[in-house]
């Protein structure tokens, strides 16, 4: 495709994602379905440029003020992630001079807001919690993107066998530093056609998400509930931990998300999973299981701000008001989920949020309502599950707390309780 046409398409895509009326990954996928003539490299350049705009939106918008033409075009030029010769051949002489000038600006001299590219309501609590050094280290990870983590399906294979098979396919993977069932790959290698993937030997899953499943301690023959299953990544991990025995319920209010579990479930080889859409957290299906469940995982609906490496649009689409509404929903789900526990049963509450409002504050409020529950130390649970250096992952209160800049995972939080026997 001619460079000018490619830049025009990039401008269109940037315009679409900046509407912020839907998740960016959905908008990018929809755009590409309409642009079937684009090749792999062209799609990569367009997608990465759109995400670069979202990651550093405030910076690019400030620098773009001195340019001419549509704002979305200026943003696309500044954030371009494709081959340099494309811009050289697509821009006018005036645009090239403007771009060269913008690239000479020392960004370290710019105001903090243009450097961290976060809304104040998010930046301020993160600075307060992490301090100056930790905050800027976190910001750097948000701009760098994320590696590709895999979970090894241990009912089909072992981690060393997967490493060997990937090497034979010309791909390099290393064991994740904490999860005993994880592998990490740099870049974005295409796995969808590999026998390892199509045969269900591996699933794409962030190491942090693997650790949440491991915290449940799910075992053979148990009754387990994944309360907010979504597309089922943790459901599949739980089923493998149970060695395809017992009974594993995958509940979610979204039938569409659960539909995404079906092909993954077929690849996995699991037959102990029972997926069901529920109307709300007080659904009759939940009531029928009251007092019968060994392990309950509540990976609660949350702001998702721990996934900004992958989903940079969330920092612009979320708000303090939305977080407060989520907090009420999180507490309501916990109140329902705890009723499922049998004596001796374990409940794990988790989010992929960085905010205490969705994490420690929710846990404190729930604990006050349920004083009979025994808090469990996440380091002990993870060590029992074979997690290396688990003490590095846990707060003084005994909760799991993962940070992208410290642990190279998405941002996660989890707390666990046991009902007295």
Image: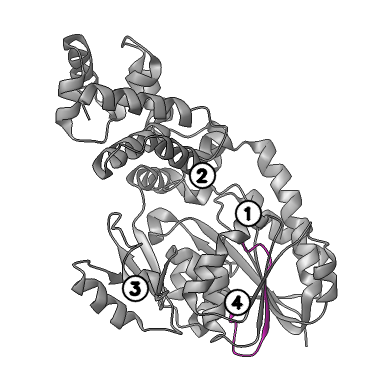
Per the image, label 2 sits on a secondary structure element best described as helix
The residue drawn where x is 43% and y is 48% is 310
The answer to whether marks 1 and 2 mark residues whose Cβ atoms lie closer than 8 Å is no
Question: Residue 99 occupies which quadrant of the picture?
Answer: top left
Work out which residue is located at the far bottom of the displayed protein and give it.
221
- Per the model, the C-alpha gap separating discs 4 and 1 is 26 Å
> Badge 1: how crowded within 10 Å, few (<14), some, or many (20+)?
few
- Per the model, the C-alpha gap separating discs 1 and 3 is 26 Å
The answer to whether marks 1 and 3 mark residues whose Cβ atoms lie closer than 8 Å is no
Q: Position of residue 356 (x, y in %)?
A: 62, 51
> Badge 4: how crowded within 10 Å, few (<14), some, or many (20+)?
many
| Image quarter of the N terminus | top left
Per the image, label 4 sits on a secondary structure element best described as helix
Between circles 3 and 2, the one closer to the viewer is: 3
Between circles 1 and 2, the one closer to the viewer is: 1
Residue that mark 4 sits on: 216
Q: Identify the magenta region.
A: 217-229
Residue that mark 3 sits on: 196
The answer to whether marks 3 and 2 mark residues whose Cβ atoms lie closer than 8 Å is no
Disc on the earlier residue, 1 or 2: 2
Q: Position of residue 333 (x, y in %)?
A: 75, 60
- The label on residue 126 is 2
Per the image, label 1 sits on a secondary structure element best described as helix
The residue drawn where x is 53% and y is 71% is 265
- The label on residue 256 is 1
């Amino acid at each position: 495709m001619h460079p000018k046409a490619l830049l025009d398409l990039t401008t269109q895509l940037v315009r679409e994602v900046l509407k912020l009326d839907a998740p960016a990954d959905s908008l990018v996928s929809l755009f590409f379905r309409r642009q079937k003539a684009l090749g792999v490299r062209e799609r990569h350049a367009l997608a990465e440029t759109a995400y670069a705009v979202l990651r550093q939106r405030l910076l690019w918008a400030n620098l773009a003020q001195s340019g001419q033409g549509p704002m979305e075009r200026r943003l696309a030029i500044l954030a371009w992630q494709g081959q340099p010769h494309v811009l050289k051949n697509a821009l006018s002489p005036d645009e090239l001079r403007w771009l060269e000038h913008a690239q000479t600006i020392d960004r370290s001299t710019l105001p903090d807001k243009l450097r961290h590219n976060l809304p104040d309501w998010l930046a301020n609590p993160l600075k307060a919690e992490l301090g100056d050094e930790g905050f800027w280290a976190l910001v750097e990870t948000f701009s760098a993107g994320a590696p590709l983590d895999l979970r090894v399906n241990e009912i089909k294979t072992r981690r060393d066998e997967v490493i060997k098979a990937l090497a034979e396919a010309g791909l390099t993977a290393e064991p994740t530093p904490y999860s005993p069932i994880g592998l990490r790959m740099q870049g974005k290698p295409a796995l969808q056609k590999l026998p390892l993937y199509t045969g269900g030997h591996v699933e794409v899953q962030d190491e942090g998400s693997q650790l949440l499943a491991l915290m449940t301690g799910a075992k053979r023959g148990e009754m387990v509930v994944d309360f907010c299953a979504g597309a089922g990544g943790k459901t599949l991990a739980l089923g493998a931990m149970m060695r395809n025995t017992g009974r594993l319920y995958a509940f979610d209010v979204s039938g569409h998300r659960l539909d995404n579990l079906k092909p993954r479930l077929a690849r996995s080889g699991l037959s102990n999973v029972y997926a069901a859409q529920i109307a709300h957290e007080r659904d009759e299906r939940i009531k029928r299981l009251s007092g019968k469940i060994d392990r309950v995982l509540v990976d609660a609906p949350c702001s998702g701000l721990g996934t900004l490496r992958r989903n940079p649009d969330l920092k612009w689409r979320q708000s303090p008001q939305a977080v407060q509404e989520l907090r009420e929903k999180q507490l309501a789900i916990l109140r329902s989920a705890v009723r499922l526990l049998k004596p001796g049963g374990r409940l794990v509450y988790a989010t992929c949020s960085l905010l205490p409002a969705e994490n420690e504050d929710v846990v404190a409020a729930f604990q006050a309502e349920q004083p009979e529950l025994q808090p469990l130390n996440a380091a002990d649970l993870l060590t029992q599950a074979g997690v290396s250096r688990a003490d590095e992952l846990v707060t003084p209160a005994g909760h799991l707390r993962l940070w992208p800049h410290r642990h190279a995972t998405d941002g996660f939080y989890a707390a666990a309780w046991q009902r007295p026997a």
